[in-house]
Image: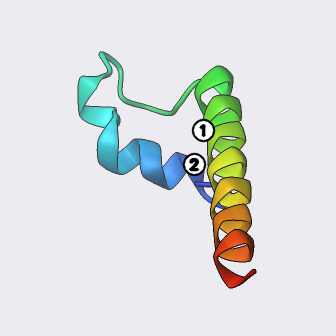
Amino acid sequence: MLAAPGAVWAVKESWKSNDGTEPSDLYLFSTRIGGGIFLLIGIAGIAVSLL
């Protein structure tokens, strides 16, 4: 989700759009932010489990 939110949109969301051409800037931004947050949570979970 961090690297290619446009590809995620094409698979998951494009069929819901009326024009279906490309994702909005807000969608790309929020998908990247969400992916980054979950990446950090995953890294923190691994670090805690190793302690």
Name the residue furthest front: 51
Q: Is residue 3 above or below residue 30?
A: below
Colour mode of the rendering: rainbow
Q: Which residue does the image show at 67% across and 54% down from the upper left?
A: 41
C-beta proximity under 8 Å, tags 1 and 2 = yes
**Quarter of the figure that contains the C terminus:** bottom right
Say whether disc 1 or disc 2 marks the residue closer to the N-terminus: 2
> Which class describes the residues within 10 Å of circle 2: few (<14), some (14-19), or many (20+)?
some
Question: Where residue 31 appears, x then y in whole percent?
Answer: 60, 38
Of the pair 8 and 51, the residue shown nearer to us: 51
Query: Marks 1 and 2, Cα distance to the nearest angstrom?
Result: 6 Å
Question: Where residue 43 appears, x then y in whole percent?
Answer: 71, 68
Question: Where residue 32 appears, x then y in whole percent?
Answer: 68, 43
Mark 2 is on which residue type? Pro
User: Disc 2 marks which residue?
Assistant: 5
Mark 1 is on which residue type? Thr
Q: Which residue does the image show at 57% across and 48% down from the upper left?
A: 5
Question: Where residue 39 appears, x then y in whole percent?
Answer: 67, 59
Residue 31: mark: 1
The quarter of the picture where residue 15 lies is: top left
